[in-house]
């Protein structure tokens, strides 16, 4: 998993999640998110393009990061999900918690819009 | 009488074996003729079940997870056995998925997924340990 600054929105970081996010890999996603948050980056996009699978363990670490980001007036937005991964968010009701976009550009635009509003 | 075809896997109850369990279940689900959604569903159910076994039944102790996938003409049956502590699904409160964010409780989410994606989920416990049976029917 790799983190980089967004080219399309100010002060937004993109985490490229990767692999099978089960109870074995969730701690790695958690560590990456916590590293970004600890560095003061509270406006995050998690890109799911390279994620074929996520379990409840992955959802839990995303929720923890989301709560931390929101406490600092930030957000964790999600993008690039396959239909199957999206199903997991829908089944859990997490699709109503997270701002989910088809592409990274659209997620970045949403950050830019919220700045104006 | 129909003879189901059985596929078996025995692995140490460790998180790093979850992907191996996932690959095994996906391969058998494909062979059973489930569609892409069905294949993903059984992977999710088996993964959540085995995560619970590692986390709660063995709770850090060493042990084995024994999976048997039975391919019937109209369904896939997954049986998962462990020799850990008894697991009673009724002890797990259902997740609170719609309340205010700070009150949401994600405990029990794995169990919720198992029950959502499988047609039947049954827990039993005896002197040998926990026995979970989950059935996924093929869509016509």
Image: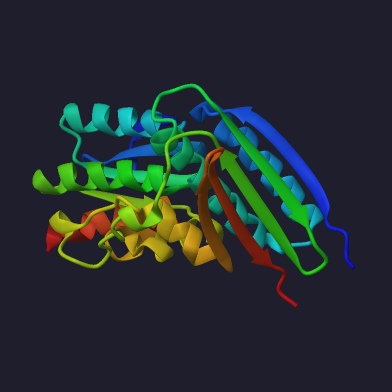
**Residue B71 falls left or right of residue B59:** right
**Residue B63 falls left or right of residue A109:** right
Give the percent coordinates (x, y) of residue B75: 73, 65
The residue positioned farthest toward the front in the image shown: B127
Quarter where residue B37 is shown: bottom right
The residue positioned farthest toward the top in the image shown: B62
Q: Nearer the viewer, residue B38 or A18?
A: B38
Residue B52 in the image: above or below residue B97? above
Total marks in image: 0
**Residue A20 falls left or right of residue B139:** left
Q: Point out the image quarter for the N terminus of chain A.
A: top left
Quarter where residue A114 is shown: bottom left
Q: Residue at x 57, y 66 (%)?
A: B120
Q: How was this image coloured? A: rainbow
Q: Residue at x 34, y 65 (%)?
A: A93
Give the percent coordinates (x, y) of residue A112: 23, 55
Q: Point out the image quarter for the C terminus of chain A.
A: bottom left
Q: Nearer the viewer, residue A23 or B135?
A: B135
- Whether residue A51 appears in this view of the structure is no
Give the percent coordinates (x, y) of residue A65: 24, 41
Q: Residue at x 29, y 52 (%)?
A: B106
- Whether residue A21 appears in this view of the structure is yes
**Residue B8 falls left or right of residue A89:** right
Q: Nearer the viewer, residue B24 or B88?
A: B88
Give the percent coordinates (x, y) of residue A85: 50, 55
Q: Residue at x 46, y 31 (%)?
A: A24
């Amino acid at each position: 998993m790799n983190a980089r600054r967004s080219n399309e929105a100010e002060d937004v970081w993109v985490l490229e999640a990767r692999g099978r996010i089960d109870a074995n890999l969730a701690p790695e996603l958690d560590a990456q998110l916590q590293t970004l948050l600890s560095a003061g980056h509270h406006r995050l996009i998690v890109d799911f393009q390279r994620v074929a699978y996520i379990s409840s363990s992955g959802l839990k670490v995303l929720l923890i990061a989301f709560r931390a980001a929101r406490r600092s007036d930030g957000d964790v937005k999600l993008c690039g999900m396959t239909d199957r991964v999206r199903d997991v968010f829908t089944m859990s009701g997490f699709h109503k918690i997270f701002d989910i976009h088809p592409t990274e550009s659209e997620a970045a635009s949403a950050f830019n819009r919220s700045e104006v509003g | 009488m129909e003879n189901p075809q059985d596929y078996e896997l025995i692995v140490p109850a460790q998180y790093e074996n979850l992907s191996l369990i996932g690959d095994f279940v996906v391969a058998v689900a494909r062979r059973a003729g489930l569609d892409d959604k069905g294949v993903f569903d059984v992977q999710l159910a088996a993964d959540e079940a085995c995560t619970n076994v590692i986390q709660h039944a063995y709770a850090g102790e060493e042990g084995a997870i024994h999976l048997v996938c039975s391919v019937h003409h109209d369904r896939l049956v997954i049986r998962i056995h462990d020799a850990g502590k008894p697991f009673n699904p009724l002890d797990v409160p259902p997740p609170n998925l719609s309340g205010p964010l700070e009150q949401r409780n994600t405990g029990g989410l794995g169990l919720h997924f198992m029950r959502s994606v499988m047609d039947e989920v049954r827990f039993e416990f005896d002197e040998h340990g926990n026995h979970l049976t989950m059935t996924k029917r093929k869509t016509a």
